[in-house]
């Protein structure tokens, strides 16, 4: 299986699956209504705002170390054109050094969102292009310029000057679309021109490992190469997605297509249209988060694993200013549910900078809502340093043994601060040994880790942890939640109490 880029030159193999990031698939929403007798009226209304996009890119022989034919337009399997182009450009005996620069073309789709000529498409459709041509519904060819692009969400904004207002389509609310709703896709598969397919919304919040903000809608509407960048419509004629990729064993549609949801796309396009810098400015909350496992959910009193557990809060960040603390579970952000850890960064990134939003939390077995003013993400500081593994050391014989957790613990001493490179103001209990086959080892606890809290209360000595374990067992709990610090990074670990 594979995922494909709409531009033949740009493909990515994902776990043995070909991800075609150049096909198109559409989605339209139907609120529990019967299948329409025909989509014709809707197609007549929407088609004038859907465009074909043609790009030209000059390829140098040494570019990427690939033969020029690898960057040529893709044709259906078995097409006579396919063999013709490969034979023409891959002539035997011609070295890359002898070959002259050549021009490769690529085809995609897009849609007009503003009568002034602003057009939305996928970034991979126009990436590397020297010339971009937009073909309107009436076959008018217009030269397009790139207004802005966002590689992380694979969205690009183009501008054409038609000398007249152009027909445009409106954004819809992808959050309101339900699995099972009718959807409609219009695009330019295989360069054939405006083509229409219909299907249903098959699933939501799909992660296909194409970027940090994956949150795709899935549809069974047929999508093929050249559909990338085209719109996915609901039954009200509103755009709820940008067709971006398909899951396929051969490059052809098998009924599994993916679209960028309009809630995300609209926010990104709005930033790209900003005349200041045409750059996307993402929201920032200032928290480090981790997954809520079943064990953690049990220790916190949650009904099931959900939300994002706050492991640490950035000093002077938006979350800290609002009162969010380590140990809180974020369940809702700006009125939208945080279904899992991966969902929160997407919601925060979409939020306008300086917007005041309500954040729903779970704290100490009870719900809580705080208002947070969204900050601006510093892209340079976005990548946080990974926690460094501490070098293994032997335990101190006199350290008390906590057999229920498989840990050997010690109070923090000057010697241990030096041995494990702990900060001068380090507080808590140091792990000096971890039993090889213990639950603690399985959960990733290491020698040199500092346990700062147990059962969401600070600890200062190994006996504190022993007491918390005893109290947890007495209350019938099956796990205890530990706050662990490693080289300055914090995370929560839930350890089962009924396992050695």
Image (cartoon, rainbow, N blue to C red):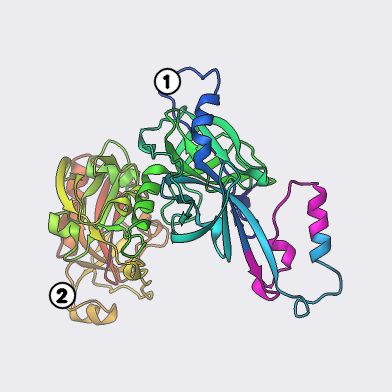
As for residue 61 lying within the magenta part, the answer is: yes
Q: What's the magenta region? A: 57-85
Residue 81 versus residue 178: which sits nearer the camera? 81
Residue 49 seen in render: yes
Question: What percent of the width, then of the height, locates residue 412?
Answer: 19, 73
Q: Tag 1, which secondary structure?
A: loop
Relative to 364, 255 lies left or right: right
For the residue pair 5 and 370, the one nearer the viewer reads as 5
Few, some or many residues within 10 Å of mark 1 (<14, 14–19, 20+): few
- Mark 2 lies on a secondary structure that is loop
Query: In the rendered view, would you say 275 is above or below 220?
Result: below
Choose between 486 and 404: the one closer to the eye.
486
With respect to residue 269, does 34 lie above or below?
A: above
Say which residue label 1 marks. Answer: 32
Residue 286 in view (yes/no): no
State the image coordinates of residue 416 (x, y, percent, origin top left): 24, 78
Q: For the point 55% across and 25% down, which residue is it?
A: 40
Determine whether label 1 and label 2 are within 8 Å by CB: no
Q: Which mark is residue 85?
A: none
On the image, the x and y values in percent for residue 449 come to 29, 68
Q: Where is residue 208 drawn, in percent x and y?
A: 51, 49
- Labels 1 and 2: the sequence-earlier one: 1
Judged from this view, the residue extending furthest toward the right is 92
Residue 434 falls left or right of residue 332: right
The residue under the point 42% across, 20% down is: 32
Q: Is residue 255 magenta?
A: no
Specify the farthest residue to the front: 163
C-alpha distance separating marks 1 and 2:
60 Å
Location of residue 294 (image quadrant):
top left
Instruction: State which mark lies toward you, 1 or 2.
Output: 1
Q: Which residue is mark 2?
A: 425
């Amino acid at each position: 299986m594979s995922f494909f880029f709409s531009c033949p030159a740009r493909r990515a193999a994902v776990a043995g699956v070909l991800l075609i990031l150049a096909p198109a698939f559409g989605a339209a929403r139907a609120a529990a209504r019967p299948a329409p007798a025909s989509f014709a009226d809707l197609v007549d209304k929407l088609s004038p705002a859907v465009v074909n996009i043609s790009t030209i890119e000059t390829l140098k022989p040494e570019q990427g170390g690939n033969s020029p034919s690898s960057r040529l337009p893709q044709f259906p399997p078995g097409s006579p054109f396919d063999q013709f182009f490969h034979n023409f450009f891959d002539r035997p005996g011609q070295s890359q050094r002898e070959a002259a620069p050549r021009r490769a073309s690529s085809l995609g789709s897009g849609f007009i969102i503003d009568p002034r000529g602003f057009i939305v498409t996928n970034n991979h459709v126009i990436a590397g292009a020297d010339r971009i041509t937009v073909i309107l519904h009436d076959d008018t060819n217009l030269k397009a310029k790139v207004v802005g692009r966002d590689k992380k969400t694979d969205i690009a904004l183009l501008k054409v000057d038609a000398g007249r207002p152009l027909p445009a389509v409106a954004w819809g609310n992808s959050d309101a679309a339900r699995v099972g709703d009718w959807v409609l896709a219009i695009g330019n598969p295989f360069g054939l021109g405006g083509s229409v397919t219909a299907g249903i919304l098959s699933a939501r919040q799909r992660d296909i490992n194409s970027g940090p903000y994956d949150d795709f809608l899935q549809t069974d509407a047929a999508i093929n190469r050249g559909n990338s960048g085209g719109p996915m419509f609901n039954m009200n004629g509103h755009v709820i997605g940008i067709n971006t990729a398909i899951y396929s064993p051969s490059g052809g549609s098998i009924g599994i297509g993916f679209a960028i949801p309009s809630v995300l796309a609209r926010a990104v396009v709005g930033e790209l249209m900003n005349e200041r810098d045409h750059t996307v400015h993402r929201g920032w909350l200032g928290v480090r988060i981790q997954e809520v496992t079943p064990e953690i959910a049990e220790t916190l009193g949650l009904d099931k694993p959900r939300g994002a557990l706050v492991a640490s809060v950035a000093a002077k960040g938006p979350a800290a200013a609002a009162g969010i603390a380590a140990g809180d579970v974020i369940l809702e952000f700006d009125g939208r549910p945080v279904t899992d850890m991966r969902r929160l960064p997407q919601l925060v990134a979409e939020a306008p900078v300086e917007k005041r939003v309500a954040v729903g939390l779970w704290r100490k077995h009870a719900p809580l809502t705080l208002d947070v003013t969204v900050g601006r993400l510093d892209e340079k500081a976005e990548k946080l340093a990974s926690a460094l593994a501490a070098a293994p050391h032997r335990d101190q014989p006199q350290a008390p043994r906590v057999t229920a957790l498989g840990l050997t613990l010690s109070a923090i001493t000057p010697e241990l601060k030096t041995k494990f490179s702990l900060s001068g103001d380090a507080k808590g209990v140091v792990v000096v040994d971890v039993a090889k086959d213990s639950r603690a080892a399985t959960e990733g606890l290491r020698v040199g880790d500092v346990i700062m809290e147990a059962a969401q209360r600070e600890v200062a000595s190994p006996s504190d942890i022993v007491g918390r374990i005893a109290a947890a067992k007495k209350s019938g709990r099956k796990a205890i939640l530990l706050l662990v610090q490693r080289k300055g990074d914090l995370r929560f670990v839930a350890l089962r109490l009924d396992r050695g």
